[in-house]
Amino acid sequence: MKVLITRKMPGDAVERLKDKYEVEINESDKILKKDELIKMVKGKDAILCFLTDMIDEDIIEAGKDLKVISNFAVGYDNIDVEAASSRGIPVTNTPGILTNATADLAWGLILATARKIAQGDKFVRKDRFEGWDPTLMVGSEVHGKTLGIVGMGKIGSAVARRSLGFDMEVLYHNRSRKKEVEEELDAKKVDLETLLKESDIVSLHVPLTDETEGMISWNELKMMKKSAFLINTARGEVVVEEALIEALKSEKIAGAGIDVYSDEPYGANPDYYSLDNVVLTPHLGSASHRARNGMADMAVDNLINILEGRDSDYVVNRDDL
Ligand code: GLV
């Protein structure tokens, strides 16, 4: 059978595919353009793709022999799952293994924004540090504040769990009630408006769907405290980026920590670059050795299991096949 891998993979999981199948890998490691993907997917039985690949209906249509689309990511908003389902193609993802790595990064951004760590780093590198200064880069303490989690899934819960060490109150907004998290962390479920009004740090952990796209816009940002920080390690499009940039410029909120961008997979919005009150990272949520190697293993396992006629626990469109 023939397998397409759209970029280089970390670790050696790829060897397990090479042992079994005829594998084509995009060795250039550049994001494939739509016409290149269409050409390469033809005649393939499986595709192992990344969140930088927009697997739309035309690509799925070109992949007439596809038996599985294995996404190297927990999010799968890059795939037209409906188009895959209507052709009976299972789509798989890699949840769980990247939970801690992403929660750690969210906390890195919380601390970096509140305590101006990135700003301080730039300042020292520019050789501007001339000794301790009682008024230099004074930030906000995180300890004892209120953390608002939007989307209390695996990653949201892991971010909330880390707040125990900071003696924080936890509010959350989620479609369903999470009783275990409430018991474990004394977290309170509230509506989005209450969460935005009462939290000192708002951290986003929802998947990108029609429902969550643009969920944080000017109106929502206006509801936040002037002293509050917004952290986004979910997907850029959950936030209306122009509104956030305006809110940061006009100091409607105190700052933001941003790992994901609306312009992905092609980059970040340059309007952020001149702002001191935002910390920017290049979509690093799952970028730990453990998580990335584990994601590679899971994506390969998912693909092999389906091609060999077995089941996988990580089929996201099981009910629609
Ligand atoms: C990363 O953003 C992922 O969805 O795995």
Image: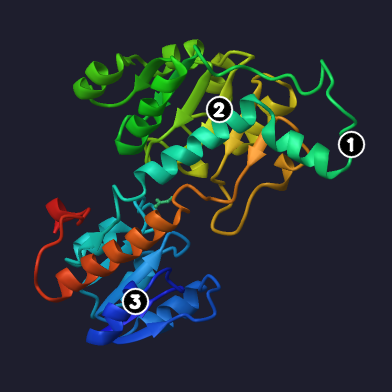
Q: Residues within 10 Å of mark 3 (few under 14, many from 20)?
A: some
The amino acid type, in three-letter code, at marker 1 is: Arg
Report the side of 65 relative to 149 (left or right).
left
Q: Position of residue 166 (x, y in %)?
A: 46, 19
In this rendering, which labeled residue sits more in front, label 3 or label 2? 3
Report the side of 282 relative to 95 (left or right).
right
Say whether disc 2 or disc 1 marks the residue closer to the N-terminus. 1
Say which mark, if any, is on residue 128.
1
Residue at the farthest bottom position:
22
Tell me how the rendering is colored.
Answer: rainbow
Residue of label 3? 14
The amino acid type, in three-letter code, at marker 3 is: Val
Please give the name of the residue rendered at 36% of the width and 20% of the height, measured from the top-left corner: 172
Vertical position of residue 91 compared to residue 140: above or below? below
| The C terminus lies in quadrant | bottom left
Residue of label 2? 230
Depth order, front residue of 129/153:
129
Residue 21 shows up from this direction: no
Report the side of 213 relative to 178 (left or right).
right
Please give the name of the residue rendered at 54% of the width and 58% of the height, measured from the top-left corner: 265
Q: Examine the image and state in which quarter residue 118 appears.
A: top right
Say whether disc 1 or disc 3 marks the residue closer to the N-terminus. 3
Residue at the farthest front position:
131
Residue at the farthest left position:
310
